[in-house]
Amino acid sequence: MGLLDGLLPAYYESILITVGIYIILALGLNLITGVTGQLNLGHAAYMCIGAYTSAIMSMHYGMPFIVAILAGGLLAAAFGVVIGYPTLRLTGDYLAICTLGFGEILKSVLYNVPAVGGAMGLAGIPPKTTLTIVFIVMIIVIISMVRVESSRFGRALVAIREDEIAAECNGINATKYKLQMFSLGCFIAGIGGALWAHKIMVLQPRDFGFLKSIEILNMVVLGGLGSIPGTILGATVLTSIPEILRFSSEYRMLLYGALLVAMMIFRPHGLMGGVSFNSIAKRGMRWLKPGDKPDDKPGQKGMGG
Amino acid sequence: MLSNLLVQLINGIALGSTYALIALGYTMVYGIILLINFAHGEIFMAGAFVGLMLVTVFKVHIIFAFLGAMLFCMIMGVIIEKIAYKPLRRSTRLAALISAIGVSIFLSNLANLVFGAKPTTFPPTEEILFKIQTYELIAGAQITNLQILTIVTSAVLMVCLQYFIKKSRIGKAMRATSQDYDTAALMGVNVNRIISYTFAIGSSLAAAGGVLVGIYFGVVKYNMGFMVGLKAFTAAVLGGIGSIPGAMFGGLLLGIGEMLAVALGLSSYRDAIAFGILILVLLIKPTGLFGTQIQKKV
Amino acid sequence: MFKTKNLFLLVTFILIAALVAGCGGGQTADKEEGGGAADADVVKIGFLGDLTGDTAVYGQNTLDGMKMAADELNAAGGVLGKQVEIVVADHRYDKAEAANIVQKFINQDKVSAIVGDPTTGVTKATAPISNGAEVVQMSAGATGLGVVEIGPYVFRNTLLDTVGGPATIDYMINELGFTKVALITAVNSDFSVGLSKIFKDAITEMGGEIVIEESLQEGDTDFSGQISNIKNKSPEVIVYSGYYTEGGLLMKEARKQGMADIIMIGGDGLQAPTFWELGGDAVEGSISYCGFSPEQPTEETAKFIADMQAKFNKEADLFNAQGYDALKIICAAMETAGSADPKVFVEALAKTKEYPGVSGVTTFLENQEPVKSPVYLLQVKDQQWTLLKKVPVEM
């Protein structure tokens, strides 16, 4: 372990770790919002559960890092089931506002629980997150997401996104699939949160507000809903943009807001809407063999109105 | 205890009527173009700042400042729609949502740059309006003239809006557009103009809310729109998004619910309770209290 | 076809832009690397704070104070004959970004010291990094527990709650005779939660009674419910542990609801002109503690207040003063040690004794904790803080 650590200057390493964690978080949300079309405005809440759980695991119970990470993911998934079971029956914006509400409730409750430090939060979490670990977890998550995408399960999720009623008519148990998908997405968010906790070393409820959820959602939408390479690109770009814009400290967030609007107007399907690893591979083949005429993949529709 | 409950009820109505004013903007926009206009809270903030500037810098009477803020935000709302939402009308709803979030981030940071992060204060009420007086009601409960003003102003604005929507030509066209966008367009309704009107009216109501809140609490801040916007949006969903009486009712219910929570000594769970009410209502009646069931055609 | 090509062009463009921007930053840093921090012709000090997020007001004010200090130092010839340069970075209250910024300060900008963050949470998330890299970090505002314990390179310039809190409560109970207390906490502020605990212990220890405990959220503006509850229990005094914005609004609401004579007693979080700008007449008579007295200001404090007014056209507040002092204390230590290398001047910094700053007379104890003595109890009279009592602090 430690293959990648120390190769780069500490500043770049720190940024890369952040990028990696955001890629993991965004991939979890991409499954929920991009692939299945269920708008989730409270992703940070599941990240928060994972972060707190893993922090408690490694601080109070001295668990190995891998156990703490998994525990964080599992508890987040459990919450995903509990919250998802009643709310996933709601559609569109009603689901969105429920997930948002849950995020705010969780934050409010954490402020009032002395066991997790209230507003002061948890401090002194061991800094165990290294670039190598983030990289390994990220690769695992990417591979499993690609596998899910091309599996029967993944195709069922896309069918639910495109037309839930039609999918049900074709024998897809939409509620069951949505619940499984939601808990998987939350599991990934929990893992991302666990890695986050062991990098930042301090957790406070206000770190996981609505704006954090929106930040992750922006990455998915900017990259292209439902597209795994797009989500990775979106997370990379949006995590680096604030660093790139650092020269204009005071105008930075102003530019960020304007960029979001401009992006949506000029590329409403995101940077790589409809692009999957498969289509990239195909394109690569085409460049190698220019004679073939590949079918141009139409842009995916994202969340239909 | 009873008098405290009554006082909290009045506090709740005063707070709730400001939520309701802002919720109307969310619900009207949503009713027509199915967009959660996240920038609406920032328009509320802008309204408060414009009102404040008119009173302190230009020494305008508060009533004209109130109207000036409404006019300013009316124009602002229309411009925002033209720049950030109109090009996205035919693309996915999420793209429009992200664009709205972008506008929201842009506006609140613009206010931060112009006015700084320090809270700006409204002049004392007695200088711009009247001296605050308290009136005794039954059972020792009290109401201040400022609360009466807030509640009455909101109520008058909402009655005007209801009348406008029900009786005027534009109002009728709005309702038609919200029921069926394409058919309304085919029937000769200038949909673009109707959408502009919707943004204009919604934004001016938010500005009215902003100035009222500014006077009521005496403080204006660059990020004041965020939480209030979130709560107002919650109120709109609670009442059934797209429904105008629903937004009014949802706002009042949310305000009263929050204050009763405070009365019961749960003030630190205030936000949790506001959103808890919302989730409960949605689970029992998924379209909100006044929402109409939309049958999805296969 | 055309569209997809376009897309790839765009993506490539963005990636290249990102790389160029990233490397650009790297190259300038590399150039300076050759010389090292000590030989460069400027002394760089990083400002770590929030300029655009939830806690922007504290960050912006700290930065203004620092700018003031740097301008003064530079006008007088700088430090060790070099100009002081503040490297500004905004983390919008995001701890991950704050951590990246500290890495950038240390590895790219090669700063000699970092001032910030004003909040305890971000300080705890970043100080282990600078301590590990042996760069001095001084928070101008973190009052919570577990800050200086992080390591020998971590300092803070602030009046500790454990000193001012009990002194204030002692005055309240034993000299003003207020025993029935309403205690209000801002649950989402670590500063307020920590101070409330100190207040509470002091009140019960000295024989006072907390008749009602209320809570609010920093950032809210509607406190009518809390005040109605408090009014119902008729306490003699309101003790609030949070900051000036909510403090002013609370008192205004109390007057609105007819609590005509009650006063507020609080911590140094109330120390800003915003308190009476918001509260107006309602905050007359309110009491808080502080490290300096505006009524009997030292020469430095009087000059600072006048200069802030001239430069930024605003009245100085606590964060202005603490940011100003933090920078000057660091630079004074550099002068004493004759070096801008943090490994060298950290010893001189730790030995700072009775530094006559604008936020009080500061001494660092052996464990790096700051002590400001004496503590001043101040009261609002005619929209100004006036001196009530001087309480000497035992070290």
Image (spheres, coloured by chain):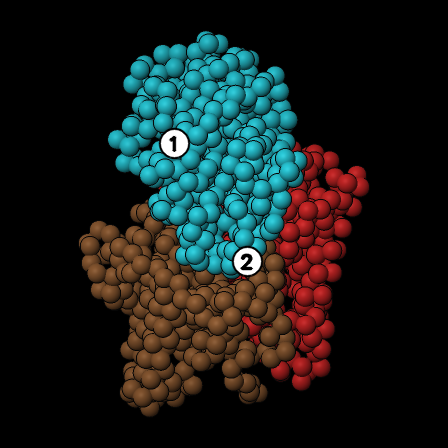
- Label 2 sits on residue: C232
Disc 2 versus disc 1: nearer the observer: 2
Residue B121: x %, y % from top left: 34, 50
Marks 2/1 same chain: yes
Residue type pointed to by label 2:
Asn
- Left or right of B24 on screen, residue B204: left
Q: Is residue A50 left or right of residue A63?
A: left
Specify the subunit that label 2 lies on. C
Q: Colour of chain A?
A: red
| Quadrant where the C terminus of chain C is found in the figure | top right
Q: Residue at x 62, y 24 (%)?
A: C151
Does any portion of residue B258 appear in the rendered image? no
- When the figure is inspected, residue C191 is found, relative to residue A235, above or below; the finding is above
Q: Give the structural element (helix, strand or loop) at label 1.
A: strand
Q: Which callout, 2 or 1, points at the residue further toward the start of the chain?
A: 2
Question: What is the C-alpha distance between the residues marked 2 and 1?
Answer: 31 Å
From the image, tell me which residue sits under label 1: C386
Asked which quadrant contains residue B19, the reply is bottom left
> Would residue C208 be visible to someone looking at this image?
yes
Query: Nearest the camera: A55 or B90?
Result: A55
